[in-house]
Amino acid sequence: MTQLKYAGPRPYISQHGISYKDGKEDKYVYIQNAIQLLKNIDHDYEIQRSYSSDIILKSLDQDVIDKILIQYEDNLKDKIELEIKNYQIKIQEEIDHINNLKNISDIEKEVWCNNINLMKDYRIQRAINKVYYFHCINDIKTIILKQHIKKITTPFNEKFWHILQTLQGVLETGTKSVSTLLDEKSLNDMQIIELNIGI
């Protein structure tokens, strides 16, 4: 199965070279927090339809992450492999598109395609990390809808902010969309993030 590992920020590839986009971090940096959130919200809710945590993170290895996600999705490995295969096809389609461009020289096409090939493994690793991340986010959405969770509160930090923003977007789109409100608050002299879910 494909392996999670840090790749780096999103590359911008052209006939002029390769650069990296600030603010487009590899999803790998969020996976540990997302998995912890998934595990922590997955329990029976009897009276209170909210979740609050001062999550203590521990490092999870690939096998543990796979075992956790497989609990929520049948054929997870096959789904991930298919998504990565489709991404590889997309890279080849980019190369084909560049080779058919009329407004740049053959040398520029060659350089651009070489740059894409040079960064292929890097981009595929970023895609693997992103696929895992979004499977985890979608599993969190499934639990929220199943358990009718109305609120999730986490410590305030950049990683949880990003995760809850992603979750907000996923909750507000698709067939079972719900309205949400994401806010930063102060609670007992601590900054927290609160995601209110209008189920």
Image (cartoon, helix red, strand yellow):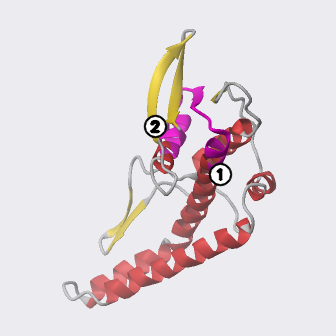
Between residues 32 and 146, which one lies in front from this camera angle?
146
Around disc 1, counting alpha carbons within 10 Å, would you say few (fewer than 14), some (14 to 19), or many (20 or more)? Answer: some
Q: What's under tag 1, amino acid-wise?
A: Asp
Residue placed at 80% from the left, 51% from the top?
Answer: 64
Around disc 2, counting alpha carbons within 10 Å, would you say few (fewer than 14), some (14 to 19), or many (20 or more)? Answer: some
Residue placed at 50% from the left, 47% from the top?
Answer: 171
For residue 135, side relative to residue 174 (left or right): right
Mark number for residue 17? none
Q: Quadrant of the N terminus?
A: bottom right
Q: Residue furthest left?
A: 103
Mark number for residue 139? 1
Q: Position of residue 110 (x, y in %)?
A: 35, 86
The residue pinned by badge 2 equals: 180
Main SS class of the magenta portion in the image: helix
How many numbered tags mark residues here? 2
Residue placed at 73% from the left, 32% from the top?
Answer: 45
Between residues 138 and 184, which one lies in front from this camera angle?
138
Q: Position of residue 11 (x, y in %)?
A: 42, 62
Element at badge 1?
helix
Q: What's under tag 2, amino acid-wise?
A: Thr
156 within the magenta span: yes
Q: Position of residue 91 (x, y in %)?
A: 46, 78
Q: Which residues are magenta?
A: 142-167
Instruction: Reply above or below: 187 against 152.
Output: above
Residue placed at 59% from the left, 72% from the top?
Answer: 84
Between residues 191 and 151, which one lies in front from this camera angle?
151
For residue 109, side relative to residue 118 (left or right): left
For residue 3, side relative to residue 118 (left or right): right
Upstream in sequence: badge 2 or badge 1 = 1
